[in-house]
Image (spheres, rainbow, N blue to C red):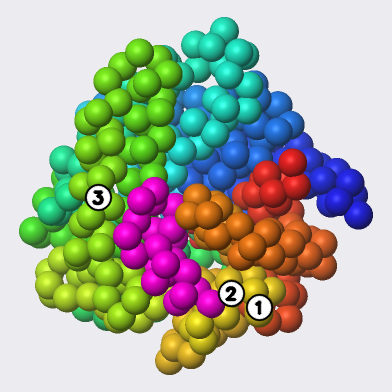
Amino acid sequence: MNAALDRAAVNVLLANWTGAYTVPSRALYPHQWSWDSAFVAIGLRHLSVRRAQRELESLFGAQWADGRVPHIVFDRAAPPEGYFPGPEFWRSAAHPASPAVATSGLVQPPVHALAVWLTFRADPGQARRRGFLPRLYPKLVAWHRYLATRRGVDDLVAIVHPWESGMDNSPAWDDALGRVEPTPAGAFRRRDLHHVQAAQRPTDTDYGRYVRLAADYRDSGYADHLADAQFVLLDPMVNALYAASESALADIAAEIGADPRPHCEAAARTGAALVTRLFADEFCHAWDVHERRLDRQRTVAGLTPLVVADLPVAPALVKSALGEHFRLGRTALPPSYDLTGPAFDPDRYWRGPGWFNTTWLIWHGLTLHGELGHADRLRDATLTAARQAGFREYVHPFSGEGRGVTDFSWTAAVVLDLLR
Ligand code: 2M8
């Protein structure tokens, strides 16, 4: 049974490989996405460590001179009408810090150093021969320096657009987005609805606000003046991955003979700030920097700080995962949003469906904190969900029925990682 699932996961990763990286989906996402590539590498390393390394190297090949790793790297050969917003919207070439290839100017959650470390660990000898870590380490350091300096707020990292959270239409952004005047729907053409039913995607009003925020950021010269930006949020998942990636950077530094201490200290500072600033009601929430308050809604992002080592509130997060809001072990996959929350929608994207990458993060965190029974059950449930639905983008959290696109890369990748 597992052999068939393994073969099917490998086939998805092979089919979505372009020669230099893996597209998330041939249909809906025909370019390279930043955090998708990190999850993909975590799976690909079991198939070909060379390819997993290449996946990450391709992404960092598009790093900006200011250290930012763009959330999309565009494939010149892909038809321009395939995805909105495309290169003509982002106009990265006009920016002095941009790379030779066209990219977006936003970022995504910094899971990369963790992916680089896990890729190294799959075959340390081969990675050493290729000089994989010495090549990636300075790029990862520059990436984290961008986040800490240009996006830093009191030892945490801010996002300036919902797309930067990876959880685009999460209800945690509703309040802040409500203050943004949407660009009229007639002023742009969505392409996503050619591939997925509207009921499983963000609304037109959401898109109008995404477009407004992205255009304003672009027109500021991607300047990161947080005081002037409309949407400035501290997201628990972005910061959990930043802390976990600083820990991975410490391991990488030690391996290549650099000083791990600054990374250990940064991981500890961010871990502590996650607790003091974002933890309330036994859960981690998003903080609105302008409004100076927590959004008390619960999303799966609030469980992902489990990936942070030595997190003092880990037992409380495990308890919250098992409780009525997420019912860990009693759903097909952990829902992306509170099952009892007012905005819960089991079909609509990041407002309820279960996702495989966030499930992998919870599994990884449970393992890290020694919760092996819960971790094993979650692994089994994830494999069952993939067997039943295939490698779908997301699933209905109760029935496990597939939603979004099929043959989705990170789904195949994290399933492969759980199988091997
Ligand atoms: C989704 O986001 C993109 C915008 O970046 C979109 O909807 O067009 C999100 O699920 C995001 O987390 C993911 O990285 C991306 C590609 O899979 O798709």
**Across the whole image, how many numbered discs are drawn on residues?**
3
Q: Position of residue 45 (x, y in %)?
A: 65, 32
Name the image quarter holding residue 70.
Answer: top left
Decide: is 22 above or below 188. Answer: above
Q: Magenta part of the protein: which range?
A: 302-322
Decide: is 294 above or below 110. Answer: below
Q: 95 left or right of 108?
A: left
Q: Is residue 102 visible?
A: no
**Which residue bears the numbered disc 3?**
270
Decide: is 317 above or below 7. Answer: below
10 Å crowding of disc 2: few (<14), some (14-19), many (20+): many
Label 2 vs label 3: CA separation?
A: 26 Å
**Which residue bears the numbered disc 2?**
328
Residue visible at 30% across and 80% down in the picture: 281
SS for callout 3: helix
Residue visible at 44% across and 52% down in the picture: 307
Question: The disc labelled 3 sits on which kind of residue?
Answer: Thr
Label 2 vs label 1: CA separation?
A: 7 Å
Chief secondary structure of the magenta portion: helix
Q: Is residue 167 visible?
A: yes
In the rendered image, the residue lying farthest to the left is 227
Q: 70 left or right of 371?
A: left
**Which badge, 2 or 3, is on the more N-terminal residue?**
3
